Amino acid sequence: MLDAPKLTVDFTQKQSVSTILPRQPLLRSDELGWSGIYVQHHHQPASESPEHILNHHVIVHHPGWEMARSKRCLAGNRQQEDLIHGSCVIVPASVLHQVTWDRELEFTLLILEPAYLTQLAREMVDGDRVELIPQFAKLDPVISNIAFALKAELETNGIKGRLYVEAATTFLASHLLRHYCTHTHSFSEYSSGLSKYRLREAIAYIQEHLSEEISLGAIAQHLCMSQYYFCHLFKQSMGVSPYQYVLQQRIEKAKQLLKHKELSVTDVALKCGFTNQTHFTKHFRQLIGITPRAYQEHRFTQFDTAILTIGVALKSELETGSIERKRYAELANTFLAAHFLRDSCTRDRFLKAYTGKLPNHKLKQAIEYIEQHLGEKISLETIAQHLDISQCHFCHLFKQSMGVSPYQYVLQQRIEKAKHLLKQQKLTITNVALECGFANQTHFTKHFRKLTGTTPKAYRKQQSHSCQNLPSLMAQLQCC
């Protein structure tokens, strides 16, 4: 006798939900246009579902604080569960499932398209065989936090936009592939970032559509590449995710528009692609530190804080009479140039000047030049001329490549050289300072203490003590 056909459930269809749950979901994402994932939030009474299989991969997340008991049959295995705050259950597509729970229950469903997960697997890992492992209730902080974030998006009618949801979905999919698949996948590594041409194309597309709904899929399609590949390489090139970059650019555009007092804050929010004024104000305050209204009102009555800060720093440096002040002034001048370029020129010109890193051969040339001239005065201008690029361009690309500014790098290298020279007892501390390019012993001591936590004199004494103890330590080792 043949087995009766199993009930098949498609959570994206209202009628299908009714076959296993007493009530329809309170919230659902069907009309928000999200790609690859559906999200539903439920409040269901105590109930028992019939045996069924699902058309989608489904994650059941329990956000409530009151514990509930359930009995679940999953892929032929039966288990009693304690459903606590943050519990997650993974029910893969086409796996036999049945569940009973004993009280009113709140839960969120993350419903993933199997085709979406398979496509991402082809892009993200070596191989395209995807078979999720069923999971009874367990705590997974990653899945739990993504579920809370997507539920919040659902409650606000998708206020952060599709780009945010797509980023969360991609992260969720990668987490499932890494931790809940029958086969251990080797994730593809990309280290080169986007090509200059594709990076320019991506930035141009984002700038052109800042006031509209932007999706990862649309940008990736514009560049003729996969969504995951684009997202990963963009972050390597820019240092931030596409979502963060779009948010930053919208805030920068808003700052320009807020200069025009005839525009209301709501008008500026809509022109910059924010859903409403509340959403705009929240992100503006997070990135700038004040509300858009305060920024608009005070911009015309207060000094430019960047210029004021540089002025104070330069005054302090001049008062110390430091030999370093020329290079310090060059850095200040570079920053001022970038500051005025940002505020008075087009965004495209600014981005063109500051994206990417120094090519490896130019970075090597810069480092070699610095090492050869550590004991001399080094200026940004001479290094830039040596590399045949502009001073402003060199300064920012060097920092992108090394993580520190040229000034900080030179200072670090001088201190490292000083540490080696301090081991030579015949050299005075003043001689070491001059050998390493410092103006005088006071200037040297100040920076040495700042970077090492001790004075040059104390460091030398400590090194001398270590050397004196070395013979006795060697003797002890030989005895052993």
Image: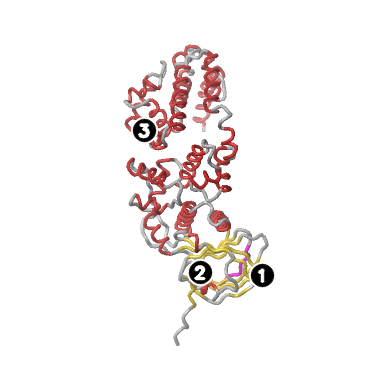
State the image coordinates of residue 44 (x, y, percent, origin top left): 62, 69
SS at mark 1 in the image? loop
Q: Earlier in the sequence, mark 1 or mark 2?
A: 2
Question: Quick check: can you spot residue 439?
Answer: yes
**Quarter occupied by the N terminus:** bottom left
Magenta run includes residue 227: no
- In the picture of the structure, the residue carrying the numbered disc 3 is 358
- Label 3: few (<14), some or many (≥20) within 10 Å? many
Q: CA distance from mark 1 to mark 2?
A: 22 Å
Q: Does 169 appear above or below 286?
A: below
Question: What residue is pinned by disc 1?
Answer: 103
Report the disc number at residue 454.
none
The span from disc 1 to disc 3 (Cα, nearest Å) is: 61 Å
Q: Classify mark 2: helix, strand or loop.
A: loop
- As shown in the figure, which amino acid type bears the numbered disc 2? Phe
Q: Mark 1 or mark 3: name the one nearer the start of the chain.
A: 1
Q: Is disc 1 in contact with disc 3, using a CB cutoff of under 8 Å?
A: no
Q: Which residue lies under the disc numbered 2?
A: 11
What span is in magenta?
78-83
Q: Amino acid at mark 3?
A: Leu
478 to the left or right of 86: left
